């Protein structure tokens, strides 16, 4: 039995901690090399690298867990592999082959076994694959050389206070344009969200609700998670939009709601004007898991959900318990959802 690192697992926040090993592969002369696991956490690239000049970079986020019987598992890494390929294509970057992506992710997790939080600790190992243009470009064009890396870091809850309902605001800033890059995990989407999130935090809000930039009437997502709503008659409603990130957590929750909990699920346009009629609201994502929202403030007007500010609403709690039960191996998973790291 490998010895776990001596960390205060239960009190970890969502932060970076340097672990022992990472994966690095390079793309040059039109091909990816095999890649290696290395202890070197430093990146050395040209001062004029595509990523530094024109933000040519994309990333992914997934988690590894320890199950009750002591296995290390990952949740749907094939979905991250596919989404990263979609992101790469949209940014004119070479695709890192999806099967190699899954293998590499498993290899890094295995190499950092001592950093995978124990079962029941409340923490998980966050896995961050990312890719960037590494050779010099000065005219606006794609790089010719790229680096693909995977780092891992043990994390606790994304939002301080764990599962306490959040207060968020309707943002005046837009996250994504029609026909833009909102549907991929491009670094640039997060760079543009820094000013809005700092503004929201300074005003005392945990996150921003972004609206569709074309009409500013429809709910999109937050800076790092998709929305789910529960209607008063117990349906799950989630925004459908071409300009939001297709969350793997959200897609999994829709399946869980239907197939495990017998709920009705509607993926459709959601207007800001109807949000006040929902019974519960949550943010879902790898980092966020499902974080309940208690209140949304729209320019001074408060939308308070009946589930209140003390705890998750009952339906979101059920969804949370079922999804995390599946992820941690306590509830039988749908075929192919759980990847065991050998
Ligand atoms: N939306 C945005 C903007 C995100 O950054 C994330 C995080 O990955 C999500 C939604 C949730 O996606 P997933 O459930 O695949 O982690
Ligand atoms: C994730 O949930 O994996 C993300 O990438 C969201 C990010 C805001 C941490």
Image (tube, rainbow, N blue to C red):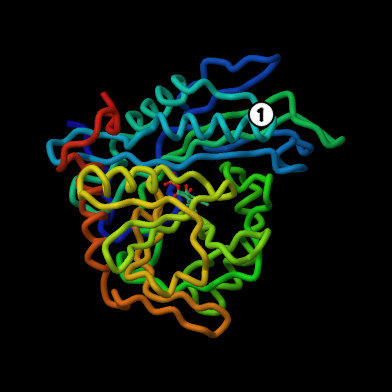
Percent x, y of residue 200: 56, 72
Quadrant of the image containing the N terminus: top left
Name which residue lies at 49% across and 21% down: 36
**As displayed, is residue 260 above or below residue 212?**
above
* Frontmost residue, 265 versus 2: 265
Furthest residue in direction bottom, as rendered = 300
Asked which secondary structure carries label 1, the reply is: loop
Name which residue lies at 27% across and 46% down: 258
Q: Which residue is mark 1?
A: 93
**As displayed, is residue 257 above or below residue 170?**
above
**As displayed, is residue 245 above or below residue 83?**
below
Furthest residue in direction left, as rendered = 69
Left or right, residue 25 beside residue 314: right
Query: Mark 1 packing: few (<14 Cα in 10 Å), some, or many (20+)?
Result: many
Where on the picture, by quarter, is residue 236? Answer: bottom left
* Frontmost residue, 26 versus 60: 60
Left or right, residue 302 beside residue 162: right
Where on the picture, by quarter, is residue 152? Answer: top left
Percent x, y of residue 122: 25, 54
* Frontmost residue, 7 versus 72: 72
Percent x, y of residue 243: 59, 49
Quadrant of the image containing the C terminus: top left
Mark 1 within 8 Å of ligand 2, using the beta carbon: no
Left or right, residue 139 beside residue 251: right
* Frontmost residue, 281 versus 74: 281
Count of residue discs: 1
Left or right, residue 1 beside residue 113: left
Percent x, y of residue 305: 35, 75
Name which residue lies at 56% across and 62% down: 218
């Amino acid at each position: 039995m490998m010895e776990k690192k001596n960390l205060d697992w239960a009190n970890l926040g969502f932060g970076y901690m340097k672990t022992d090993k990472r994966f690095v592969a390079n793309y040059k002369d039109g091909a990816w090399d095999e890649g290696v696991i290395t202890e070197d956490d430093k990146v050395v690239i040209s001062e004029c690298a595509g990523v530094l000049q024109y933000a040519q970079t994309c990333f992914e986020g997934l988690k590894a867990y320890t199950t009750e019987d002591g296995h290390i598992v990952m949740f749907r890494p094939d979905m991250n592999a596919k989404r990263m390929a979609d992101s790469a294509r949209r940014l004119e970057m070479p695709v890192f082959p999806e099967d190699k992506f899954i293998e590499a992710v498993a290899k890094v997790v295995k190499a950092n076994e001592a950093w995978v939080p124990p079962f029941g600790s409340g923490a998980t190992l966050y896995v961050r694959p990312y890719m960037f243009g590494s050779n010099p470009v000065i005219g606006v064009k794609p790089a010719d050389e790229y680096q693909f890396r995977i780092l891992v870091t043990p994390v606790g809850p994304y939002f301080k206070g764990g599962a306490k309902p959040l207060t968020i605001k309707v943002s005046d800033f837009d996250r994504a344009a029609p026909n833009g890059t909102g549907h991929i995990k491009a670094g640039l989407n997060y760079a543009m969200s820094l000013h809005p999130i700092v503004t929201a935090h300074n005003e005392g809000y945990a996150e921003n609700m972004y609206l569709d930039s074309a009409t500013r009437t429809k709910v999109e997502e937050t800076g790092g998670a998709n929305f789910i709503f529960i209607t008063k008659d117990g349906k799950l409603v989630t925004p459908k939009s071409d300009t939001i990130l297709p969350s793997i957590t959200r897609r999994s929750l829709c399946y869980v709601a239907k197939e495990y909990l017998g709920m009705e699920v509607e993926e459709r346009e959601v207007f800001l004007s109807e949000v006040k009629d929902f019974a519960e609201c949550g943010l879902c994502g790898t980092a966020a898991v499902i974080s309940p929202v208690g209140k949304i403030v729209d320019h001074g007007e408060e939308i308070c959900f009946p589930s209140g500010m003390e705890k998750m609403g009952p339906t979101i709690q059920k969804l949370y318990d079922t999804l995390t039960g599946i992820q941690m191996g306590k509830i039988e998973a749908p075929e192919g959802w759980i990847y065991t790291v050998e």
